[in-house]
Structures are given as C-alpha cells and as structure tokens.
C-alpha cells in the first residue's frame, strides 16, 4: 500500500507517511486508541513512496493496561470508494438539475448531451465498466 518493503517499515513511525492535513486527526486517533476501551475509527490521507496520496480508514483498538497497553490497527485503502462516491454525487447533481436538462432537450429534441455528460462522469471507472 505504501510502496515500501516490510523490512523498511519495521520500527518506522507511520506518522512520517501521514499527510500534513491529516496529522492532527492521526494524533487524536492514536491517543484515543491508547486511552479509551472502545474501538476508534478515522479517515486520514497517507502519502506513498511515489508521492501519490491515498485515502485510508484507520480502525484501532487498545488492549492491556499500564505500560503493557498496546494498540492493534487496521489500515484500509478507501481511495477508490471515495472516488466512485464523488462521481455518483456529481451525476446525481446533474440529474437533479432538471430545469437545465429540460431546456436543452426542448431546444434540440434530443437528450444526447445529457447522456454524454453522464458518460464523462463515469468514464474510466471500473465501477461501471466504461473505459476511455
């Protein structure tokens, strides 16, 4: 996920991969996981070795007590899910602007323009199988 070998990750502070915008959320998430008994979840940005930024959901739970307290953490890449959600929201906004669509349809009698807009929103998404 990070573009780094497992050997290079041993004893490496994961904070160095967290984007500047996510540092506060990351700190608060880790702190809560160490202090509270309940599972903790947050979304953060992680910068890969090749400078690509991934959206990550961090799920953590603490166990043990005192100096033996530890935290187990799972990092889930949600980059593609967030991209598809943004595409769906954009398509929904376009469809909900019915007055604009109605004027364009009545002026030329066809709805091709709207269809091509929706295809542009979905283009390149493996979600619906359209390739560009």
Image (cartoon, helix red, strand yellow):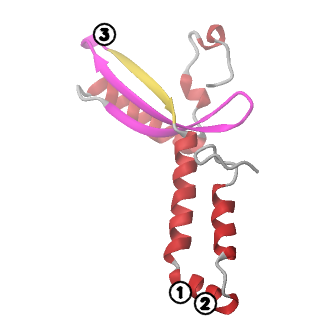
Residue assigned mark 1: 99
Point 67% across, 13% down: residue: 5
Residue 65, position in %: x, y?
24, 13
Q: Residue furthest front?
A: 109
Frontmost residue, 56 versus 99:
99
Q: Is residue 25 magenta?
A: no
Point 62% across, 11% down: residue: 6
Residue 29, position in %: x, y?
39, 34
Marks 3/2: CA–CA distance: 68 Å
- Magenta stretch, main secondary structure, is strand
Residue assigned mark 3: 67
SS type, badge 3: helix
Give the quadrant of residue 114: bottom right
Frontmost residue, 32 versus 116:
116
Give the quadrant of residue 103: bottom right
Q: Is residue 41 magenta?
A: yes
Residue assigned mark 2: 103
Frontmost residue, 51 versus 114:
114
Magenta highlight range: 40-69
Q: Badge 2 local density, few (<14 within 10 Å), some, or many (20+)?
A: few
Depth-wise, is mark 3 or mark 1 nearer the camera?
A: 1
Q: Earlier in the sequence, mark 3 or mark 2?
A: 3
Vertical side of 77 occupied by 110: above or below: below
Depth-wise, is mark 3 or mark 2 nearer the camera?
A: 2
Label 2 near label 1: C-beta < 8 Å?
yes
């Amino acid at each position: 996920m990070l573009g780094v070998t497992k050997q290079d990750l041993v004893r490496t502070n994961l904070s160095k991969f967290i984007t500047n915008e996510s540092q506060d959320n990351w700190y608060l998430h880790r702190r809560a996981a160490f202090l509270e008994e309940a599972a903790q979840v947050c979304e953060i940005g992680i910068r890969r070795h090749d400078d690509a930024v991934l959206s990550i959901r961090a799920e953590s739970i603490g166990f043990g007590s005192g100096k033996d307290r530890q935290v187990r953490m799972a990092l889930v890449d949600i980059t593609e899910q967030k991209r598809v959600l943004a595409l769906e929201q954009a398509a929904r906004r376009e469809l909900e602007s019915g007055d604009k669509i109605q004027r364009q349809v009545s002026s030329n009698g066809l709805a091709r323009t709207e269809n091509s807009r929706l295809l542009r929103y979905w283009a390149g998404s493996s979600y619906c199988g359209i390739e560009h």
